[in-house]
Image (spheres, rainbow, N blue to C red):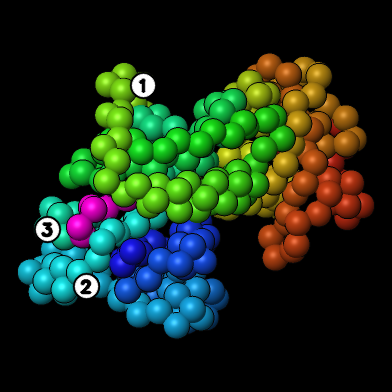
Amino acid sequence: MRIVFMGTPDFAATALQALAAAGHEIVCVYSQPPRPAGRGYGVKPSPVHTRAEIMGLLVRTPVSLKSAEEQEAFAALKADAAVVVAYGLLLPKPVLAAPRFGCFNIHASLLPRWRGAAPIQRAIMAGDTETGVTIMRMDAGLDTGPMLLVGKTPISATTTAGELHDRLAALGAKLIVKTLETPDAPGTPQPETGATYARKIEKAEAMIDFGWPAETVRNHIHGLSPFPGAWTMIGKARVKVLKAEVADGAAVPGTAIDDHLSIACSSGAVRFLEVQREGKSAMTADALLRGLSVPAGMRLG
């Protein structure tokens, strides 16, 4: 099939590679324009853009698809299908209608739960025990189209957003290849109940609130790991917490209850397992304690 691929982050790059490996002709790749990145604020192309260039594919990076000129350029590709994965731009109706079999989306949740921008993180932060990938045929709504294939995967007490991201990227790549074997399948309408919205992660959310129950704090930490990373202040040091576990103990929330980085919450406690100081690599909690004293009774935050 002649496919237009539309995506931006690493999650999408996995699917692009799988579609090419399955023998489809990728006639064009659309991605977000290069953005300033790093301390020098040099302009950097997206992961999908980079992967596409390595593969020798045509790449387009429009800032919008609303103009008649952009829509005509898209239609001129005469695609059989478009595959959209975390692209970042809304597709106008003329773009949705241009490919022969329509536009297919890989969404990292069990729709209609967690429609929107951050389904992986929100599923963990909410304490969900299961999530997955939904392949849908796109319509004009926000992640509202009919479902074609669904794959599920568990979320455990140790699952981080980074780990779940990689698992779902591989699952989504597998499912989109299978979906395109029968691209004219009608699909199943999404349930009318159970819809939730996975709003974008804001930096202000990353500060750990020990006034929550221990399980909520742990889920918050894992849902933001490795990026942007939930954090707290230990003395004057800002420390990201990348992995944690629920522990026994009680004290004023935010208080260390032992000498091993177990911190009291509103109920129970969390023990830090993996952390990261500013400008440093990730390390175990024990390694942090060799250079930063956190005695029982110390208040964090």
Mark 1, secondary structure of its residue: loop
The residue that appears at 39% across and 43% down in the rendered structure is 135
Quadrant (top left, top right, bottom left, bottom right) of the N terminus: bottom left
Q: Amino acid at mark 2?
A: Leu
The circle on residue 77 is 2
* Closer to the eye: label 3 or 1: 3
- Residue 102 included in the magenta stretch of the image: yes
* Closer to the eye: label 2 or 1: 2
Circles 2 and 3: CB distance less than 8 Å?
no
Residue on which the image places disc 1:
194
- CA–CA distance in space, label 2 to label 1: 37 Å
Q: Amino acid at mark 3?
A: Pro
- Residue 201 in sight from this viewpoint: no
Q: In this view of the protein, which residue sits in the foreground, 281 or 86?
A: 86
Q: Which residues are magenta?
A: 99-104
Q: Position of residue 12 (x, y in %)?
A: 46, 59
The residue that appears at 84% across and 41% down in the rendered structure is 294
- Residue 222 in sight from this viewpoint: yes
The residue that appears at 41% across and 66% down in the rendered structure is 24
* Closer to the eye: label 2 or 3: 2
The residue that appears at 77% across and 46% down in the rendered structure is 274
The circle on residue 94 is 3
Q: Position of residue 41 (x, y in %)?
A: 47, 78
- Residue 211 included in the magenta stretch of the image: no
Residue 133 lies left or right of residue 162; in this view the side is left
- CA–CA distance in space, label 3 to label 1: 30 Å
Relative to 49, residue 231 above or below: above
Of labels 2 and 1, earlier in sequence is: 2
- CA–CA distance in space, label 2 to label 3: 13 Å
